[in-house]
Amino acid sequence: MKLATRLPSERSLDPHDADRIADIRGRLIEIGDRWRTEHPLVARNQNAIGLCLFIASIIGVLADATLYVEGVIPWWLCVPLSAFWLSILHELEHDLIHWMYFRSSKRVHNAMMFGVWFFRPSTINPWIRRRLHLHHHQVSGTESDIEERALTNGERWGGHRMIKLIDQFVGMYLRPWHAKELARAYIREEAKSREEARELAEQLKRSYFPLGPVHYGLWHLFVILHAIALLGLSIPANPAYDALNVLAVVLLAPNAFRTFCLHFVSSNLHYFGDVEAHNVLQQTQVWTSKWLWPLHAFCFNFGGTHAIHHFLVRDPFYLRQAIAPDCQRVLREGGVRFDDYATFMRANRFVVNAPAHVEV
């Protein structure tokens, strides 16, 4: 089992760590295989389940919007309800990036890719994100891991990190040189030629277009107008202002809320800076504390299941959640860290006594 489940990139690791990783991966495979045997109907219909979750989540968002517009539910209920449905769309996007649904039917696959992006316009183009995310799996916790570093992983806690978690565009505007450095580190590692480096640079420049600027432009306009209103300045009633308010409640605010929950968990769950390349034991921890559930409710228990995904990519998100208790026991026995919240004080460094500083 160890030889069969050791990846080529792990051959450079210390044999003890490589064996531990292989053993964990092998046991996770066994758990997943056993679950599939016990639930054959679910196991045989992965494409259909993914499509049903996709359709149900979109219906959920549209239903919440309708109920809000009709005055059936208040804004404070519509926002978290829609954020929950959008969190499922995020998980579907992640699975789609790993080709877990409709691999042989590109038309349906791409339609789902567009759908999860259209309803989550605050995110980057998922076709571009695919390469960034696969790169993340190869280099997690190292300098060129642009996907996690862009979410503030590895930064010292302070005003800028909190602002960027709340609003990624504002965070980039405040420190544009940092975004450029992340891009350069990624391109240096990923590009195999000057031509490819230029192509990657162009991809990164347009990664949010066209949906991202529209989303953030409308969201920032909404925030500014309501800040003006709080200062006591009246805003004349008009259809455009009313439409903006509705859009903010049914889509913009749910996406902002969901994004914060996910980015807060993900950026602190992953380790950065002093991890050994390809050593999955050092890439992420597992979060199980009950106080995290208000966040986990809107990122589908990301902190409790993401470490499983780093060891074993093959399982869709709903299966990872189903087998999480058994998998967590294996991870704990294998030496993966659990609930290491001191990482907040050391800028996500893996070494326990690491200083909490990083140049950004």
Image: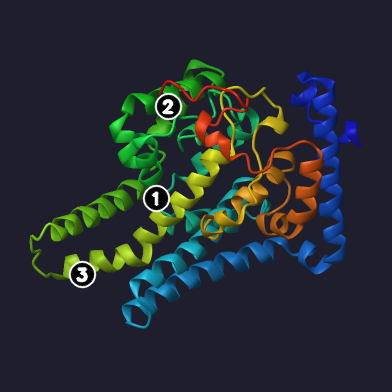
Q: CA distance from mark 1 to mark 2?
A: 20 Å
Give percent across and percent down for residue 226. 19, 59
Task: Give the image location of residue 347, x and y in percent.
Answer: 50, 30
The residue labelled by disc 2 is 201
The answer to whether any part of residue 4 appears in the image is yes
Q: Earlier in the sequence, mark 1 or mark 2?
A: 1
Residue appearing at x 55%, y 20% in the figure: 189
Three-letter code, disc 3? Asp
Q: Which residue is mark 3?
A: 242
Quadrant in which the C terminus appears: top left
Residue density around tag 1, few if under 14, some if 14–19, many if 20 or more, within 10 Å: many
Which residue is rendered at x = 51% and y = 32% of the image? 345
Residue where numbered disc 1 is placed: 122
Disc with the residue nearer the chain's start (2 vs 3): 2
**Above or below — where is 268 with respect to 223?**
above
Up the image or down, 187 lies above or below 298; here it is above
Quarter of the figure with residue 56:
bottom right
Q: Nearer the viewer, residue 324 or 320?
A: 324
Which residue type carries mark 2?
Ala
Q: Earlier in the sequence, mark 3 or mark 1?
A: 1
